[in-house]
Image (spheres, rainbow, N blue to C red):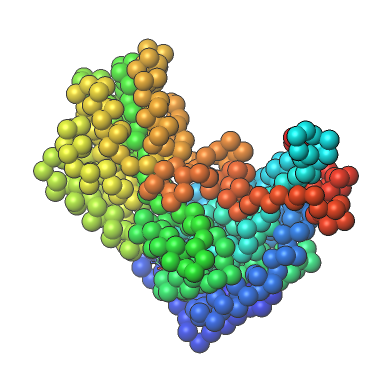
Amino acid sequence: MDGTFPIGARAVDSDVTFLAIDPSTDAKIEPAFAVSSEEDVAEACKLAEAAFDTFRETDPETRAKFLETIADEIEAIHEPLVARAIQESGLPRPRLEGERGRTTGQLRLFAKHLRAGTWASVIIDEAQPDRKPAPRADLRQRRIAVGPVAVFGASNFPLAFSVAGGDTASALAAGCPVVVKGHPAHPGTSVMVGKAIQAAVAKCGLPEGVFSLVQGPANELGAALVKDARIKAVGFTGSRGGGLALVALAAARAEPIPVYAEMSSVNPVILFPAALAARGEALGKAYVGSLTMGSGQFCTNPGIVVAVDGPDLDTFVEAAAAALGEAAPQVMLTPGIHASYDKGVAALAGHDAVETLARGTEAEGANRGRAALFSTTGKAFVADPALSHEVFGAASIIVRCADLAEVRQVLEQVEGQLTITLQIDEGDYADAATLVPVLERKAGRILANGWPTGVEVAPAMVHGGPFPATSDPRTTSVGTAAIERFLRPVCYQDLPDALLPKAVKHDNPLGLPRTEG
Ligand SMILES: NC(=O)C1=CN([C@@H]2O[C@H](COP(=O)(O)OP(=O)(O)OC[C@H]3O[C@@H](n4cnc5c(N)ncnc54)[C@H](OP(=O)(O)O)[C@@H]3O)[C@@H](O)[C@H]2O)C=CC1
Ligand SMILES: O=C(O)CCC(=O)C(=O)O
């Protein structure tokens, strides 16, 4: 691996470089990576704009083959890629192998979606020249790509939410050229995947500006990308502060653009009485499994458990505390993320209304996250909004409520969420039904008798939700519906067939499904 990054068809170098850090030791790792300049950002955006009209009008089959070629290129570097991602993220091999599979799987799923054609949402309202009192014009609607898209790689998913992750896959599927701002925590992983995409662009004979990668350790780079007038939408996964900064930059542009930022979520889990009575102990153990997976570094991590107080909740709490007390420390993604986890845990531990129920085993070595379990009362939770804020890592708080009305109050208090989970048995259905309207207002995904971590990449998936889970609750970042955020409708009124794009021509040469009005 060399330290250059791909801009269009070029490998760009620089005298200014930075090194990745192995979070398991805090040691710097070779090679040095070129830091992209603002000129590189401008060049990437210029190439993306130049590629746009050609790329967006490629046939769906061409883009499907392109996505499959990217998947092939990534598979071809599987072993060195996974090895580098382990070094840069501290995540364990099985997790990264699974994530590699999820990444290529989602590229192939978008290829299938492109071939199905429903994404183009073609609607044909044939002319009605004899309609009284006025004739109707011929109206044809399809959706087109919005323009070049900026994608910010996430630190916690170096493959599936990074350079060739969900945002890149959905934007390319839509026909949008992509400029990725790689996360500085995993520059080697980003460059390897970036070069795989660059190779796929060349193999498929596409314009070079379809893909570029910029990276460096300063956030001015990402700011320059969002401010570039040629960028028409932004995809982001990360902190609330980072996401909001990008939203503000995008809104302040002469031409404001949408930012699809996935930010913070505490993913409440509600334990209902019959489920608690039937399997409190098993639920306690399973909860800790979901909480501590990947050192808790999932935006879907179960950060809050809400239940009516009583002996069955005690059983759950005892089982959870015992399991968490045995949880071994795990390497966190970066020194910064580890430090902010420790700070968040210390704030909860020092809170007057919070009891520390258990801590994971003692941490040894650099950046080890020690799991933490807390409890509080419904009243205290409602009184202090700070108790509902995300602590990114394996920390969670159990909220003991006096009754179902207080459970509802707690849910009304929490901000927008990616997920809300119900642990229910049949005897709980009547109570749970009364909460469903609150759950729908609060979350993008409501699940029963499972755990929120581990998002299925599927057409019906919603990985989104009201603020601050995301900056725009109308879409999803996972699943084929994610393509919709990078498309916009255009209506062609009475255009002669010769001028119509293939998608809406009278003889439907692309064979796209149509809704007839
Ligand atoms: N809920 C979730 O899914 C996640 C939450 N987090 C939270 O984020 C914290 C930090 O983690 P990290 O992953 O680095 O997330 P950040 O939000 O800090 O960074 C993500 C990306 O956005 C860029 N960025 C951040 N702020 C700005 C800005 N003001 N202007 C331009 N670009 C910006 C960063 O660039 P640069 O690094 O160069 O500044 C990086 O490329 C964690 O401790 C955790 O609290 C993290 C990951 C996922
Ligand atoms: O739980 C998952 O699989 C996805 C989590 C996620 O989107 C994130 O942590 O950023």
The residue nearer to you, when weighing 400 against 313, is 400
State the image coordinates of residue 414 (x, y, percent, origin top left): 30, 39
Above or below, 508 relative to 382? below
Residue at the bottom extreme of this rendering: 15
Asked if one can make out residue 439 in the rendered structure from this viewpoint, the answer is: yes
Q: On the rendered image, what quadrant is the C terminus found in?
A: top right
- Residue 507 as seen in the image, left or right of residue 429: right
- Residue 52 as seen in the image, left or right of residue 411: right
The image quadrant that residue 168 belongs to is bottom right
Residue in the picture at 23% in, 44% down:
385
Residue at the top extreme of this rendering: 427
Q: On the rendered image, what quadrant is the N terminus found in?
A: bottom right
Residue in the picture at 37% in, 42% down:
416
Residue at the left extreme of this rendering: 352
The image quadrant that residue 52 belongs to is bottom right
Residue in the picture at 22% in, 21% down:
403
Above or below, 311 relative to 297? above
State the image coordinates of residue 399 (x, y, percent, origin top left): 24, 33
Residue at the front extreme of this rendering: 133
- Residue 165 as seen in the image, left or right of residue 268: right
State the image coordinates of residue 127 (x, y, percent, origin top left): 81, 40
Above or below, 460 relative to 78? above
Asked if one can make out residue 97 in the rendered structure from this viewpoint, the answer is: no
